[in-house]
Image (cartoon, rainbow, N blue to C red):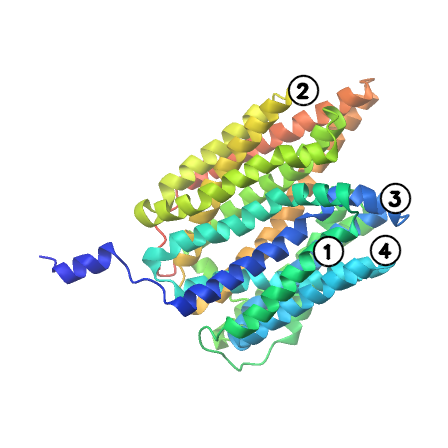
Amino acid sequence: MTSAGVSDAVASPPALGRGDRVVIGVLLVATFVVILNETIMGVALPVLLTELNVTAAVGQWLTAGFLLTMSVVIPITGYLIQRVPTRVLYGVAMSLFSAGTLLAALAPGFAVLLVARVVQACGTAIMLPLLMTTVMTLVPPARRGALMGNISIVISVAPAIGPTVSGVLLDAFGWRAMFWTVLPISVAMLVLGLRRVTRIGESSDAPIDVLSVVLSVFGFGGLVYGLSSFGHGAGASTTTLWLSLAVGVAGIAAFVLRQLSLQRDERALLDLRTFGFRTFTLASALMMVMMVMLLGVATILPIYMQNVLKLAPLATGLLLLPGGLLMGLLSPLVGRLYDRVGPRILLIVGTVATSASLWFASGFDASTPAPLVLVFHLLLSLGLAFSFTPLFSAGLGALPARLYSHGSAIFGTTQQLAAAAGVALLVSVMSARAASLAAAGEPGVGAEMGGIHTAFLFAAVLSLAAVAGSFAVKGGKAESPE
């Protein structure tokens, strides 16, 4: 018979101390700011091309360069989190981000702005793995769902409202206002964090493996460069594009072999023993599928709304805002539900809603009313809100504490790869179909609409894999490696 004390402990897990709540709160706000910054460039790019007098092939590197830097830095964060005191690492991340933001606001031309974006990306790459590792370390398992719900707000709402914020600032003040608005917030979070963030976990003094860093740069950097060039039409030659993909694949293969050797002595830059845990591996794969759909659709949808439905950029951003707000409202609720019912039911609801929204969107045409587009985006947002929290919580919760930092870094790395792949896949599908229809004599808007329809249909078919995978995810308790 269970004693009353034990029963109470199970029913009401211990609350976080005030200091721990402050640390997590600071990290949440700081991460929200850096991810919001990551997504404001899309709407601003056409304005920047005109004002900085650069072509689209050159200008797109303001986004692709940011993504490329993230893909190179994130694999190193697992090592950094274990070996650098939390306060120091937070200070470095937010200092880099703040310095990059200031440089971007003052940039006299494209070259300086691109450097500023790279500096910003170095800080951004550290923040999300640092936040997830801190939550997994400080929060007891019974309360992790609620906290991961807050992280889901950061991951999902910041990209969702980024275009709206960008559109409003561009319309009222110009492109520099995007950075001047973010700068005081980032500096305030830097100062507050240096005062309140404390050391989390134990530090290790193992030296960094330089060869692993080099291999990760060529592997992840090459792959993301190739995918980004492929998806954005960066103007790279076919030979250069495929060569970068080949270098990326070879680099990742060599990186994996190197980590398998180093992890025997606990010296791996990215410990791949995380993939020995079934739930983590499955959650990582499903997260990649969801990110492919999220970022791919986030690229295709504004093209459809502006080029086919003829909506202005500001109207496009405002129409997407309710979906972002819905995700923000739902994420804490989903987190609390996770603590009660576990991941499977939530994931089934989330992936089915996501899939249903994409099948619905595959029927859009040039005469679709804007309110139906809003309904689609709300249903998609609901599905994503019910998916992200269970995937983060169950995936990381299956790992032992010593692998939290590596698991967080792997989640971040695979998300960047999936983001690049999602944009590349859907834009390429759209472009190929549009070109085929144009060659067959279809008028311009009709050909573009045909390409967009095919891209939505491709995403809808892909979503069925996420639905199937959701049934296989189990509870997010620590597992034994298989």
| Residue at image coords 68%, 33% | 316
Which residue is identified by label 4?
110
Q: In this view, does 341 lie to the left or right of 240?
A: left
> Could you classify mark 4 by the number of other residues whose Cα lies within 10 Å: few (under 14), some (14-19), or many (20 or more)?
many
**Residue 365 marker:** 2
Q: Earlier in the sequence, mark 2 or mark 4?
A: 4
Q: What element carries label 1?
A: helix
Kindly report the distance in space between the C-alpha atoms of the residues bearing marks 4 and 1.
15 Å
Kindly report the distance in space between the C-alpha atoms of the residues bearing marks 1 and 2.
36 Å
> Could you classify mark 1 by the number of other residues whose Cα lies within 10 Å: few (under 14), some (14-19), or many (20 or more)?
many
Which residue is identified by label 3?
50
The relative height of residue 216 versus residue 42 in the rendered view (above or below) is: below
The residue under label 4 is which amino acid type? Phe
Q: Do the residues labelled 2 and 4 touch (CB within 8 Å)?
A: no
| Residue at image coords 47%, 58% | 275
Q: Are marks 1 and 2 in contact (CB under 8 Å)?
A: no
Choose mark 1 or mark 2, whichever is in front: 1
Label tally? 4
Q: Which of marks 4 and 3 is nearer the N terminus?
A: 3
Kindly report the distance in space between the C-alpha atoms of the residues bearing marks 2 and 3.
30 Å
State the image coordinates of residue 131 (x, y, percent, origin top left).
51, 62
Q: Earlier in the sequence, mark 3 or mark 1?
A: 3
Q: Do the residues labelled 2 and 3 touch (CB within 8 Å)?
A: no
Choose mark 2 or mark 3, whichever is in front: 3
| Residue at image coords 63%, 51% | 36
Q: In this view, does 93 lie to the left or right of 78?
A: right
State the image coordinates of residue 15 (x, y, percent, origin top left).
32, 62
